[in-house]
């Protein structure tokens, strides 16, 4: 957009394009090692106590000898894409212009595969930097149907991972997400609605509405991510993919009658009607 070799000065070009001159000169700075360590600790506290907001997290960190201001904690939470999971005011819109759909799972008996899929995104720490993991989970069986590791929180990542699940496993009756901007964006919702699925969205901050995915995040972080130190994005992608293969096929769940997610998924798939 800005041509540094143009005869017009950069100041003049910025003015004509109606953008700040500061943005032209700004060079993104990597997250400091101190902030990366702090973000990992915030993530662990968030898993243990999801109701904690920036103030309570600051207090917990302070008691552990980590002295940081509430505003800085809040800044890092925004960067990580997490928030306190408790009722909050002003929750009618996830982002300007984005439609929020009603929650459809309350009192719904979820008993078969491909009845309800749930999507969510979580923060994954690495040695230097971090990535975001988005996954599609079949609620009845807990099977991870598709996932993607990305360096940004954008609707395109949610769109790609749900398209992968559609291509591999067909179409569910309901797709449930939270109210994150990547899920309320038309780029994502149009793909889901075009398949004839109903869209359901959690109440903002209501963690119980999407508890199955929250449990998956806890499992992968404590059973794999926190035990490793990913050197880069490629290593994270490879190891997380390996974990999900093991999780689906070798990890029995007490709530699934000691079956693995894969076994439960196959067992509860609706039977195809025989031709007359």
Image: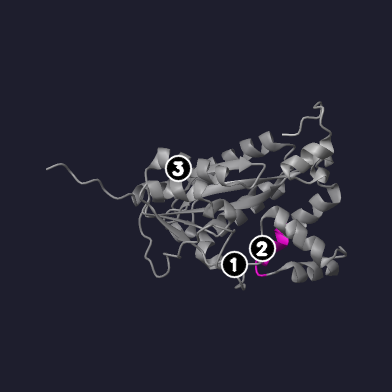
Q: How many marks?
A: 3
N-term mark: 2 or 1: 2
Residue 13, given in percent of the width and then of the height, sits at: 78, 37
Q: CA distance from mark 2 to mark 1?
A: 7 Å
Tell me if 70 is positioned left or right of 272 in this view. Answer: right
Tell me if 226 is positioned left or right of 177 in this view. Answer: right
Residue 62, given in percent of the width and then of the height, sits at: 85, 68
In magenta, the rendered stretch is 43-51
Q: Is residue 127 magenta?
A: no
Circle 2: element type: loop
Q: Residue at x 49, y 55 (%)?
A: 253
Q: How is the image coloured?
A: one colour
| Residue that label 1 marks | 205
Tell me if 155 is positioned left or right of 7 in this view. Answer: left
| Residue that label 3 marks | 165
N-term mark: 3 or 1: 3
Q: Residue furthest left?
A: 276
Q: Which mark is residue 13?
A: none
Bin the neighbour count of mark 2 within 10 Å (Cα to Cα): few under 14, some 14-19, many 20 and up: some
């Amino acid at each position: 957009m800005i041509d540094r070799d143009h005869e017009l000065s950069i100041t003049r070009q910025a003015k004509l394009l109606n953008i700040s001159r500061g943005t032209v000169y700004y060079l993104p700075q990597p997250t400091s090692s101190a902030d990366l360590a702090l973000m990992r600790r915030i993530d662990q506290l968030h898993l243990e106590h999801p109701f904690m907001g920036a103030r309570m997290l600051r207090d917990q960190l302070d008691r552990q000898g980590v002295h940081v201001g509430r505003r800085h904690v809040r800044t890092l939470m925004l960067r990580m894409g997490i928030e306190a999971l408790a009722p909050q005011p002003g929750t009618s819109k996830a982002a300007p212009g984005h439609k929020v759909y009603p929650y459809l799972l309350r009192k719904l008996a979820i008993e078969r595969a491909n009845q309800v899929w749930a999507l969510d995104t979580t923060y994954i720490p690495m040695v230097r930097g971090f990535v975001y993991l988005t996954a599609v989970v079949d609620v009845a069986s807990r099977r991870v149907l598709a996932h993607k590791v990305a360096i940004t929180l954008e609707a395109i990542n949610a769109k790609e991972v749900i398209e992968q699940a559609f291509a591999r496993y067909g179409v569910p009756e309901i797709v449930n997400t939270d109210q994150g901007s990547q899920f309320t964006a038309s780029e994502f919702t149009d793909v889901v609605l075009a398949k004839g699925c109903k869209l359901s969205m959690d109440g903002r901050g209501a963690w119980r509405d999407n508890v199955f995915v929250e449990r998956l995040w806890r499992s992968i972080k404590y059973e794999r991510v926190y035990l490793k130190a990913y050197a880069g994005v490629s290593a994270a992608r490879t190891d997380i993919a390996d974990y999900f293969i093991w999780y689906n096929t070798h990890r029995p769940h007490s709530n699934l009658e000691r079956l693995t997610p894969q076994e439960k998924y196959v067992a509860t798939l609706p039977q195809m009607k025989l031709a007359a």
